[in-house]
Amino acid sequence: MDSTEKLLQEITDANGPSGYEDSAREVMARYLKGYAEISHDRLGSVIGRKKGKSDSPRVMVAGHLDEIGFMVSEITPEGFIKFLTLGGWWPHVVLGQRVRILTSKGPVIGVVGSQPPHILKDDDRKKVMSIDDMFIDVGTMEKYDVTKKLGVRVGDSIVPESSFTIMNHKKMYLAKAFDNRVSCAIAVDVLKNFKSGNHPNTLYSVGTVQEEVGSRGATTVANIVKPDVAIIVDVGIARDVPPEDYKRPERLGNGPSLLVYEGSMIPNKRLRELIMETAEAKKIPYHLTSMPRGGSDGGPVHKSGEGVPSVYMGPPTRYIHSHNSIIYREDYDNTVKLITEVIKKLDKKTVDALYKY
């Protein structure tokens, strides 16, 4: 396992649903240590600052630390756990999955219970069960007090039970929380590329909190950093699976996704063109795509202050917002390379030209 795989393993295996990002934050801060001045906002986002040849422009590269998860909302008299969502879950991918409830006594393994099809009515088999009707079974039985025995309480966070795995194809990685810990790892590796301080700006590599519930950490971080330009790093949606066309541009191995539109932001056209020119000059693969629904940390960041030229880019990823996602190592490496090369160009004159009309 090389250093990048070790970083990805540690940061994705860390538990950190929205509002409970402590473990993931600790991993990112530890990897930034020695390369950057580290600070935090009051919500818990981590900010790594690396001064280059000039205090300005301030260039922010941001990924979000939180993963989608759940929270204990009720414990039934029989000891079954009712839960609410932290972030967007599609009910299809929740039933029958193992989860880890994070209690004061340590993690408790459970499974999202489901009735076998043999006893369902025909009409019920055709329906997608509402998450409100689901429950978690932690191995309870009558008169088994899960609060006393296991420490499970209302308000405890819940995460998928899934560990980082290098697949049989050695450049394919499987894990929970690639959305969006992969981008926090990218932000770390980009900053480490500037350990000599030879960049014409000051770089901020940031891990924000609570993106999946409304980009809350991005709002507070933007108030602190006051970026002059922002590269929002988040996963692209890989579409190279059935029934899609395997030759679509949004596929593993086709380099980072560069968005022309996303639900919370129309990315800055001039910055996007600079990235495209850089990729083509350096022969780094990339592809253009869009995401008409949903949003990203780019939403609040690009509207902060007097306005911040911002883009959204990142490695294409299969099966986001589920218990397990897949990325391709070369897409990760090419995302790091492309962002690094773009940052080298972001001097004051270049950044000023992004928003002078």
Image (spheres, helix red, strand yellow):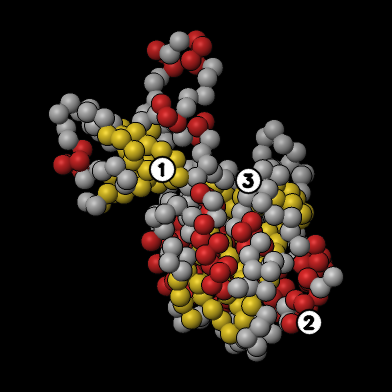
Q: Position of residue 46 (x, y in %)?
A: 47, 69
Q: Position of residue 336 (x, y in %)?
A: 64, 68
Secondary element at image label 1: strand
Of 17 and 323, nearer the camera is 17
> Amino acid type of disc 2?
Lys
Q: Residue at the spot x=56%, y=81% of the render? A: 50
Q: Picture quarter containing residue 340?
A: bottom right
Answer with mark 2 or mark 3, whichever residue precedes in sequence: 3
Mark 3 burial class by Cα count in 10 Å: few <14, some 14-19, many 20+: few
Q: Residue furthest front?
A: 306
Secondary element at image label 3: loop
Q: Position of residue 339 (x, y in %)?
A: 68, 69
* Contact? badges 2 and 3 (CB < 8 Å): no
In the rendered view, would you say 149 is above or below 286?
above
Answer with mark 3 or mark 1, whichever residue precedes in sequence: 1
Q: Residue furthest bottom?
A: 53
Mark 2–mark 3 Cα distance, whole angstroms, equals 33 Å
Q: Which residue is mark 1?
A: 70
Q: Which residue is mark 2?
A: 349
Answer with mark 2 or mark 1, whichever residue precedes in sequence: 1
Q: Picture quarter containing residue 223?
A: bottom right
In the rendered view, would you say 41 is above or below 242?
below
Q: Which residue is mark 3?
A: 294
> Amino acid type of disc 3?
Gly
> Amino acid type of disc 1?
Phe
Q: Position of residue 192 (x, y in %)?
A: 56, 77
- Residue 109: in sight, yes or no? no
Mark 1 burial class by Cα count in 10 Å: few <14, some 14-19, many 20+: many
